[in-house]
Image: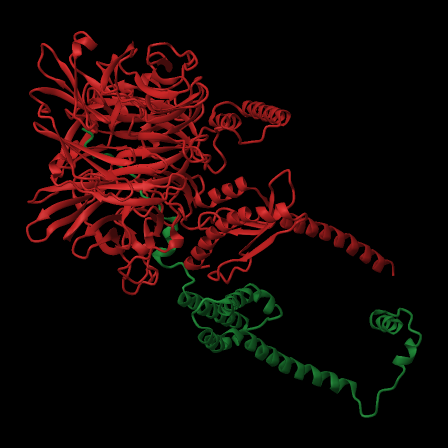
Chain colours: A green, B red
């Protein structure tokens, strides 16, 4: 416990009283180290590499939903059209995941700036919509969508009478 | 649980109840012997219900001497209509067991019909009254209670007609009509002891034959007019003939010329001669050996007597006659003996009974209240046997039987009344018991809602008032709450339990408690409580006769009382007779009770009501004119149509009833001869029940499209029977639109005879016929469909005159493995529940058949919602609603919706009355009877406690953590 506490202390504590502030600055540079060249080099490489990497990474994210489509198709095929707990769970996941992703698009692409941001977002949204459509198709083939007239039968108005009849055998 | 299993468990349960009652009786002995809790019997349920392990009954007897309570463990009874599941320990008394049985099976009341002959059975130890009735029933009634000890129901036609009842050490009956059946019965158990038949050679004289028992021999007498009297004697047990038939010469018997009237009072055959100057009373004792004719002139008995005779009633110990409803003439020592005492009134009934003071003539009448007087044969008044001036409701009594004690003057009189009630009266005038035998012949039944209680009515009226400001409604709210509080306090103070006693005729929460208004053939109208089966009121209308129908004019709704109208014909004039009653109290509403000057062709009530919530009565009289009661409602008549079917000519006429601004007129709009080229007869007519509502406009198919029903509310099903040159008899069913007269559907069955059973609900039709070709009963069904598209836009009222398209008619027929005598559809409040057809069978059971077994689309290809077609219709024993009860001569089934959607109320009428509740889709809207309220409450309370406890503990823990 005490160990943990001390660790915590080291992790989060800020020491406002550095005992050897002067010592750190007084350490000489190692031999062969040129401060000016290092700075300029780092500047240029960082600018190109990290940008490319980010774009690549973001394209990965944007294309992610589309890449899931074949997998989803396979799952859908495997799940079958019977209505039981596992296919229903799968269909639920198929719908819920892209919807959630669509709502969190802004968060996913928060740090993106640049020329390809609009395209990436567009592809990402398209991918999710494709997934939703796939899920809906699955629901349709499972018969879960109220698309038939019998699904609305309970809401149809009962028949009312316009005429009233009475009678039977002659009572004479 | 599927249908089969459920039924099986129900049947097993029914058996269990009986086993249980048997066990209680059986366990009497060990209880008396042993000291402690001694006898424990367990019975596992039938192996047919392996899935229900708890279905067993254990009866323990307990040594409580003061009460006959019995412990019954794990008492499980299941049925489609109600499910009773008593776990743990239930105290069961015999009466409770009976009540439980009633709860499961329904309630039955047994009747015998109007009593024809009755005799006191004084020979056997258990005192009984043996009766034979006009319903061809032989029964033994308990002397103390009037309950039926045993009963035999004979054939309903003339072959079951009881001609003689003789009670000796065993009971002898002669039934039938050449051949006669002579049967001997054990009086204690009703077991048949002997039977032999007697056939007359000359069948034409059979109707004049008379039977009686004399000296242990059955005597059969036939008068042969103009010639002789044949007398034959038979051994009662074996039927062996003692010697040949003796022929007594009596050429003077010829009704018509010489003799005006003849009468038989065993063993004397008496006639009145026709010759006017000296009318003679001629009598002959047909069993005496030297034949001797006794004569006496009528004028010596009574001056100016035209010669009207009637026999003494009620098994008179001395044979006798009443001449001119005035003088009593007895046969004594082969001579006439005219009594000094006169018959006081022409409707008075007289008999001679053996008492401690010798034979006594007893006379009863009810011209001014029930009155009983007795005289000895010498004319002295017997003061002990009399009735005080009482005002009993005994209408025109007729003595059936009299029994008197040997040692003292104490007599009991069994009497029949003109309203078909039977009373056993003590000589002092005390009615020991009464039986309303007119209930064996019910013509018409109506279930009537009870009025809501005062508190509910106040609440209703409170919300009815729309006008007034917010403050006024607040004040009204406060007022009604004060009222409710007062009612509560009063109830608590008086300790009255809610909904008990006959006084609380108030609507219950589920509207299960009703008054059944029963109109009988005799003209007596009853109000019967459907839960207890007790008669709440009765009303005798001697002049009401003919075909009768009951129409509800108004349901009880505060502040109006309920009103029903009985439309019939007047017995004297044959004209229309309209009686309006309050069905809760049985009081006649005089202003709505009318005797018409004309006969009634048909009648109906209007759908719309006036300001007083009263539905007007529309009557089409024999001149095809229309009368509306009350006349002020004439302006409400619009879009009203009537049809009248003549059963014998098969002509159906349709009328449009219109209000032309001044009066209501009828116009014949169509007329249809349903028979075709041949003579036809309409056997039955069925139109949609007034209580029926159609909820769903169609049904879903397997491909998830909708097949729309042709729910025309104006359809009427006619079932006809006509002769055909090639196929002998043909049954034709026609579905007509009663507004336009258009034939919507029809079908015919060759070589068949129709049964008068047809039912119709929604778009479903069913009728039954006997197939002569295959010698079996078949049930044919029809269903009408519009197709995959709805013809009219949703919400538009259906009008027959506007529809021009013909529906699709689906037809199917099934073999019924029983003979039905009554049929009805179950009706529920909103028609969401399945529909079942209830069939009353000649075997005495009421069976429910789901419509899915009968539907005309059964066997449709590619339909998974309908069953595959099988011609044989299963009638499994577990679908019998009446369980082991046999209901002889089931005549009709009446259904009514309860306030619960799942439940339909059913009354079966016939010789017996049987009431039960039917739940076609099981009681889905009710908690099961075994619902464990205690467990649920305890679990809920524990959960709430645990929630708060853990919340407290959690907060304490976080606080502790924070301090660390």
Q: From the image, which quarter does the N terminus of chain A lie in? A: bottom right
Residue A119: image location, x then y, percent: 51, 72
Residue B423: image location, x then y, percent: 39, 25
The answer to which quarter of the image holds residue B248 is: top left
The answer to which quarter of the image holds residue B908 is: top left
A111 w.r.t. B513: above or below = below
A167 w.r.t. B281: above or below = below
B83 w.r.t. A3: above or below = above
Q: Is residue B441 visible?
A: no
Q: Between residues B230 and B589, which one lies in front from this camera angle?
A: B230
Q: Residue furthest front?
A: B290
Residue A141: image location, x then y, percent: 40, 68
Q: Between residues A152 and B199, which one lies in front from this camera angle?
A: B199
Q: Residue at x 19, y 20 (%)?
A: B573
Q: Is residue B2 visible?
A: yes
Q: From the image, which quarter does the C terminus of chain A lie in? A: top left
Q: Between residues B807 and A60, which one lies in front from this camera angle?
A: B807
């Amino acid at each position: 416990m005490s160990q943990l506490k001390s660790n915590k202390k080291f992790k989060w504590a800020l020491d406002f009283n550095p005992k050897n502030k002067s010592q750190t600055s007084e350490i000489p540079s190692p031999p062969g180290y040129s401060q000016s060249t290092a700075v300029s080099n780092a500047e240029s490489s960082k600018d190109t590499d990290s940008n490319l990497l980010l774009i690549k990474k973001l394209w990965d994210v944007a294309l992610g939903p589309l890449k899931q489509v074949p997998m989803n198709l396979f799952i859908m095929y495997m799940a079958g059209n019977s209505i039981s707990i596992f296919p229903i769970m799968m269909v639920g996941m198929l719908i819920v995941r892209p919807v959630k992703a669509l709502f969190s698009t802004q968060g996913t692409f928060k740090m993106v700036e640049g020329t390809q941001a609009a395209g990436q977002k567009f592809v990402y949204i398209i991918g999710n919509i494709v997934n939703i459509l796939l899920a809906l198709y699955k629901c349709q083939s499972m018969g879960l969508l109220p698309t038939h007239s019998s699904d609305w039968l309970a809401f149809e108005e009962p028949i009312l009478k316009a005429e009233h009849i009475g009678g039977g055998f002659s009572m004479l | 649980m599927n249908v089969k299993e459920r039924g099986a468990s129900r049947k097993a349960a029914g058996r269990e109840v009986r086993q249980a009652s048997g066990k209680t009786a059986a366990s009497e002995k060990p209880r008396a012997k042993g000291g402690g809790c001694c006898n424990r019997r367990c019975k596992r349920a039938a192996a047919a219900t392996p899935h229900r392990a708890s279905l067993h009954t254990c009866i323990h007897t307990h040594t409580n001497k003061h009460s006959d309570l019995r412990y019954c463990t794990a008492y499980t009874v299941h049925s489609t209509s109600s499910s009773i599941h008593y776990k743990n320990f239930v105290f069961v008394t015999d009466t409770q067991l009976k009540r439980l049985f009633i709860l499961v099976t329904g309630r039955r009341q047994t009747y015998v019909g109007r009593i024809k002959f009755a005799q006191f059975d004084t020979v056997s130890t258990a005192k009984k009254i043996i009766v034979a009735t006009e319903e061809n029933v032989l029964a033994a009634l308990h002397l103390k209670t009037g309950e039926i000890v045993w009963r035999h129901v004979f054939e309903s036609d003339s072959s079951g007609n009881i001609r003689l009842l003789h009670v000796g050490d065993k009971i002898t009956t002669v039934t039938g009509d050449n051949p006669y059946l002579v049967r001997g019965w054990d009086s204690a158990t009703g077991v048949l002891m002997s039977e032999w038949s007697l056939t007359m050679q000359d069948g034409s004289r059979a109707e004049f034959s008379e039977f009686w028992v004399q000296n242990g021999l059955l005597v059969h007498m036939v008068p042969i007019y103009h010639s002789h009297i044949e007398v034959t004697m038979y051994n009662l047990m074996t039927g062996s003939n003692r010697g040949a038939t003796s022929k007594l010469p009596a050429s003077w018997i010829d009704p018509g010329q010489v003799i005006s009237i003849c009468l038989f009072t065993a063993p004397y055959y008496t006639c009145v001669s026709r010759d006017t100057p000296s009318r003679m009373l001629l009598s002959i004792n047909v069993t005496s050996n030297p034949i001797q004719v006794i004569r006496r002139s009528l004028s010596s008995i009574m001056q100016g007597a035209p010669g009207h005779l009637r026999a003494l009633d009620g098994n008179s110990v001395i044979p006798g006659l009443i001449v001119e409803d005035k003088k009593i003439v007895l046969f004594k020592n082969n001579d006439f003996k005219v009594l000094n005492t006169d018959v006081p009134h022409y409707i008075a009934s007289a008999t001679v009974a053996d008492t401690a003071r010798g034979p006594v003539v007893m006379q009863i009448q009810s011209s001014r209240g029930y009155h009983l007087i007795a005289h000895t044969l010498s004319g002295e008044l017997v003061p002990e046997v009399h009735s005080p001036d009482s005002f009993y409701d005994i209408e025109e009594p007729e003595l059936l039987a009299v029994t008197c004690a040997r040692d003292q003057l104490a007599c009991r009189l069994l009497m029949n009344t003109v309203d078909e009630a039977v009373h056993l009266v003590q000589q002092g005038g005390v009615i020991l018991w009464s039986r309303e035998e007119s209930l064996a012949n019910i013509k018409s039944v109506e279930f009537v809602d009870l009025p809501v209680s005062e508190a509910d009515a106040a609440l209703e009226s409170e919300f009815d008032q729309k006008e007034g400001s917010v403050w006024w409604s607040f004040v009204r709210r406060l007022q009604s709450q004060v009222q409710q509080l007062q009612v509560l306090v009063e109830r608590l103070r008086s300790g009255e339990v809610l909904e008990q006693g006959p006084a609380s005729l108030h609507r219950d929460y589920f509207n299960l408690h009703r008054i059944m208004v029963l109109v009988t053939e005799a003209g007596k109208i009853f109000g019967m409580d459907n839960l207890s089966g007790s008669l709440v009121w009765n009303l005798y209308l001697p002049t009401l006769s003919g075909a009768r129908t009951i129409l509800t004019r108004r349901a009880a709704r505060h502040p109006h009382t309920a009103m029903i109208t009985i439309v019939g014909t007047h017995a004297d004039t044959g004209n229309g007779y309209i009686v309006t009653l309050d069905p809760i109290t049985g009081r006649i509403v005089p202003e709505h009770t009318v005797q018409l000057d004309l006969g009634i062709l048909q009648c109906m009530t209007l759908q719309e009501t006036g300001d007083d919530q009263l539905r007007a009565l529309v009557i089409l009289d024999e001149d095809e004119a229309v009368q509306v009661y009350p006349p002020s409602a004439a302006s409400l008549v619009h879009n009203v149509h009537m049809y009248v079917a003549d059963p014998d000519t098969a002509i159906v006429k349709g009328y449009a009833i219109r209000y032309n601004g001044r009066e209501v007129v009828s116009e014949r709009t169509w007329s249809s001869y349903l028979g075709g080229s041949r003579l036809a007869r309409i056997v039955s007519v069925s139109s949609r029940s007034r209580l029926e509502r159609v909820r769903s406009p169609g049904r879903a198919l397997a491909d998830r499209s909708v097949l729309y029903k042709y729910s025309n509310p104006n359809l009427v099903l006619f079932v006809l029977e006509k002769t055909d040159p090639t196929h002998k008899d043909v049954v034709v069913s026609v579905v007509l639109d009663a507004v336009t007269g258009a034939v919507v559907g029809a079908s015919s069955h060759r070589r068949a005879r129709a049964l008068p059973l047809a039912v119709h609900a929604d778009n479903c039709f069913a009728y039954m016929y006997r197939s002569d070709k295959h010698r079996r009963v078949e049930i044919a069904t029809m269903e009408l469909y519009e197709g995959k598209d709805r013809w009219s836009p949703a919400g538009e009222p259906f009008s027959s005159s506007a529809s021009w398209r013909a529906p699709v008619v689906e037809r199917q027929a099934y073999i019924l493995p029983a003979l039905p005598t009554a049929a009805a559809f179950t009706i529920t409040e909103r028609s969401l529940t399945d529909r079942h057809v209830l069939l009353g069978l000649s075997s005495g059971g009421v069976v429910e058949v789901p419509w899915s077994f009968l539907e005309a689309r059964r066997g449709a290809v590619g339909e998974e919602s309908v069953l595959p077609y099988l011609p044989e219709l299963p009638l499994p024993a577990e679908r019998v609603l009446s369980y082991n009860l046999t209901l002889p001569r089931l005549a009709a089934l009446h259904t009514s919706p309860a306030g619960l959607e799942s439940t339909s109320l059913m009354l079966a009428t016939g010789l017996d009355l049987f009431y039960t509740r039917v739940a076609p889709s099981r009681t889905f809207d009710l908690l099961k009877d075994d619902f464990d309220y205690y467990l649920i409450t305890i679990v809920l309370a524990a959960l709430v406690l645990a929630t708060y406890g853990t919340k407290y503990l959690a907060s304490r823990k976080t606080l502790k953590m924070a301090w660390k």
